[in-house]
Image (cartoon, rainbow, N blue to C red):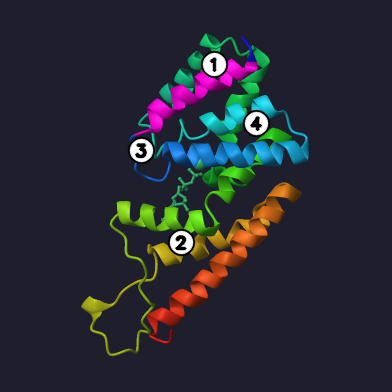
Amino acid sequence: MNQKFVIQNTEEFVRQKLEQEGTGHDWWHIVRVVEITKRIAQDEEADPFISVMAALLHDLIDDKVVVDKEVALHEVKTWMSSQQVDEHNQVHILNIIQTISFKDGNDTLTSIEAQVVQDADRLDAIGAIGIARCFAFAGSQGNLIYAPHEEPESNMSQGRYRQRNGTAINHFYEKLLKLKDLMNTSTGYKLAEERHQFMNQYLDQFYAEWKGMR
Ligand code: ADP
Ligand code: NI
């Protein structure tokens, strides 16, 4: 089948699956990751078909989205077979979507296409959009926006002692501010720099407002 049609059909397949997703892996996340994938793939001379297919399918096997990862993998494979994606490409695409997630961040990515899609996925976690996703995710988990770390010697009673861990702002330090230096490609890095700078600016303003200074 023509690669253009395979991509169109796969868009429809993924859109239907993720339309109802509420944890930041919704269909519009995929749309953004695909757009940025196309851009980076072009600059980095990565295979556009492999890259876009992997970008489209990358969150269908995330255990935050699916109950059983093995079943989900099988479903993705069956889908690609139904679209007559050749075996060699299927293996490559499945390999990419299994290795790029943040959790497995220490794995060495074996292809330029994997590096491109991982960069695109990470870019969507930073900058203005990344900030929005971070607060949306925290809200979905019932987590706070921010809780300043109280010194043990403070007057607060034990019961009111709040941990900084687990808040949306804490997630900036746990992950978001680290992503710029984890970019695989130079195009990804260039795009990450502006988004990174914007997050720092955002934090400055956030803390100033928190203290009633601005
Ligand atoms: P992905 O599936 O894209 O690899 P995650 O599933 O880790 O990434 O996260 C999805 C989105 O939710 C990202 O924008 C991420 O920053 C955000 N997120 C993940 N964990 C937290 C958290 N503990 N607090 C706030 N946001 C989070
Ligand atoms: Ni993703």
Rate crowding at label 2 as few (under 14), some (14 to 19) or many (20 or more) other CA atoms within 10 Å. Answer: some
Q: Secondary structure at mark 2?
A: helix
Residue 33 vs 123, above or below: the answer is above
- The residue carrying mark 4 is 51
| Disc ID at residue 80 | 1
| Disc ID at residue 98 | none
Q: Quadrant of the N terminus?
A: top right
- State whether label 4 is within 8 Å of ligand 2: no
Q: Is residue 198 visible?
A: yes
Span shown in magenta: 3-19
Left or right, 191 with respect to 163, comes to: right
Q: Quadrant of the C terminus?
A: bottom left
- State whether label 2 is within 8 Å of ligand 1: yes
Q: Secondary structure at mark 3?
A: loop
Residue at horizontal 65%, vertical 31%? 51
Residue 146 vs 33, above or below: the answer is below
Circles 3, 1 touching at the beta carbon (< 8 Å)? no
Left or right, 192 with respect to 172, comes to: right
- The residue carrying mark 2 is 171
Q: CA distance from mark 2 to mark 1?
A: 35 Å
Circles 3, 4 touching at the beta carbon (< 8 Å)? no
